[in-house]
Amino acid sequence: MIHPQGWFAVPVLMSLGFTFGFLREWRGSLIAPVCAHAINNGLILALALLLIG
């Protein structure tokens, strides 16, 4: 909830958090959720750059 997207993004951020937590439990390592988080950030950045440019 400290992300700056506002209250409307809370359900999406919660689902991402649950997914990353599931990946951590399933794989038993932080590598999978960290990679998933990086992929998510990269996709959002690419989308933002495409929309801006």
Image: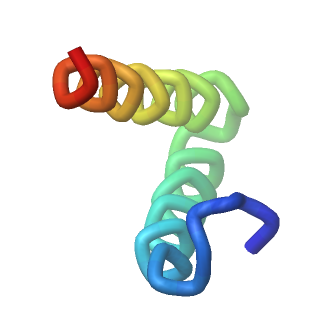
Q: What residue appears at the point 36 percent right and 34 percent down from the top-left corner?
A: 44
Q: Which residue, as the protein is rendered here, is positioned at the far front?
A: 53
Residue visible at 63% across and 46% down? 24
Instruction: Name the image quarter holding residue 14.
Output: bottom right
Residue 28 position (above or below residue 11) = above
Give residue 12's position: percent from left, percent from top.
Answer: 42, 71
Q: Nearer the viewer, residue 16 or 52?
A: 52
Count the labels in the image: 0
Residue 45 picture quarter: top left
**38 shown above or below 18:** above
Q: Is 31 left or right of 52, judged from the image as shown? A: right
Instruction: Give the position of the N terminus as an image quadrant.
Output: bottom right
Q: Nearer the viewer, residue 40 or 36?
A: 40
Q: Residue at x 48, y 74 (%)?
A: 9
Which residue sits furthest right? 2
Please name the colour scheme applied to the rendered image.
rainbow
In the displayed structure, 30 sits above or below 6; it is: above
- Residue 32 percent location from the top left of the image: 54, 29
Residue 23 position in % (x across, y down): 52, 48
Image quarter where the C terminus lies is top left
13 sits left or right of 45 in the view: right
**Side (left or right) of 35 relative to 52:** right
